[in-house]
Image (cartoon, helix red, strand yellow):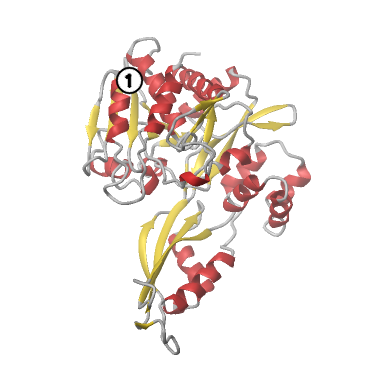
Amino acid sequence: MSDVLELCAQLIRNRCVNDGTPASGQEVRSVETIADYLGTAGTVVEPHPGRASSVVRVAGSDPDAPTLMLMGHTDVVPVTAETWSRDPFGGEVVDGVLWGRGAVDMLNLTAAMAVVTKRVIDGDLAAPPGGLVYLAVADEEAGGTHGAGWLVDVEPELVACDDLLTEIAYPTVEIAGGVAQPVMVAEKGPSWRTLHAQGTPGHASAPLGRASALAPLVKAIDALLTSEGPLLIGDEWRAFIDGLGLDPALVAELVDPERIDDVIARMAATDPGMARYLHACTRLTTAPTVVEAGTKANTIPDRGSVTVDMRLLPGQVPADADRHLEATLGEDLGGLTVELHSEMGGNASPAAGRLWDAMASAYGSLGVDRLTPAMTPATTDARFFREKGVRAYGAGWFDGSATFGEFLDMFHGNDERISIASLDRTVQLLERVVGAYGGRS
């Protein structure tokens, strides 16, 4: 078993499930696993018991040269085991494929980055002149409060770098005359809210005239599920579409606000994962996710809430989320009150500079004809570093075992898995990126 496969499988088995509560995650388990593998724990920080992150710095030959960071998170989202074909925390290998929660999001990259870092530590691969930083970070799946957000705010020198490579990594895309590699340069921003409702309690056996807190919640949830957020064909979207080498007629549809939904509707019939990606990358999205109400079966609920995941594109601002709620629910929000959890706009890095050039060199040596800047509709820890002026990208190198749409559907979904070949290929890519970043082919 290769190092990257064995390490990724163990990270899956560590079961660092982050449900959003402070005591969950327990990423200290994976910090210890990675420390055992690297032969060093580096600097370990633990803002909350068990919520550990590890920073390993390898010095270069020139302290004034740019520093490259490889960052992977170690936490994963919860899972309903009954809906999986295999044990989501078994780390099983079947027919050349590793199964488990986190296999694509993002323990594959976290493990591959550790393998490359170990090769630098052992002297098998030269560090960039400005040094290499490996960050195994906690709490990405719940907003970075105990992870990257905390580190950037409280320990900025510990995680200082000039360029950052992290998630999300995409499969290659076949284009006319070759292969294009989407590289994540932009992401949407989280604008999470909880809507609260109040009612009047009473015995559920006599509900007539009772003001149940569920009534306004049900109306709000139905309205939010069927509403469409403001559409925006931004520069990041145009750059992605332009880089795919598509038929000009299709390109014209994909960048036309009046016609893009027709493309999405057609694609939903054959590639629903890709259709979801196109939809999410061209508008503010709204998804009710967690509903709470009532205390027992025979009591009318006097309070309830629904948590709403809203995501802003680069170019959209938090006020756009407020306006969308008012347009959907009414100026008084249907009598609901709003609790704000997270408020950050989308952000992006330019597809240019030292790390971009290093990736172009690395991918080119592996037979990729073109890099195309891509957006992720999700939110990553890269945003904290971009806010400080760091250029941040997401990249890997996968085989053709999953299409673009199929790959995206595994994020937070059932039967998450990654091929062994993709793990090995990503290690190969990262070695070449580190070498090219340091000025070596």
Q: Residues within 10 Å of mark 1 (few under 14, many from 20)?
A: some
Front residue of 65/321: it is: 321
Q: Considering only vertical position in the picture, is 27 above or below 308? A: above
Front residue of 409/357: it is: 409
Residue 438 seen in this snapshot: no
Front residue of 426/269: it is: 269
Q: Amino acid at mark 1?
A: Tyr
Q: Residue 150, how many percent across, how many down? A: 27, 44
Q: Residue 83, how many percent across, how many down? A: 52, 46
In-image side of 278 versus 40 (left or right): right
Residue pictured at 32% horizontal, 42% vertical = 25
Residue positioned most to the top: 124
Q: Residue 103, how many percent across, how many down? A: 48, 33
In-image side of 249 versus 106 (left or right): right
In-image side of 239 versus 392 (left or right): right
Q: Looking at the rendering, which quadrant does residue 210 occupy?
A: bottom left
Q: Considering only vertical position in the picture, is 290 above or below 89? A: below
Residue positioned most to the bottom: 209
Residue pictured at 46% horizontal, 38% vertical = 88
Q: Residue 171, how many percent across, how many down? A: 59, 32
Q: Considering only vertical position in the picture, is 294 above or below 309? A: below
Front residue of 319/31: it is: 31
In-image side of 147 versus 369 (left or right): left
Q: Residue under circle 1?
A: 37
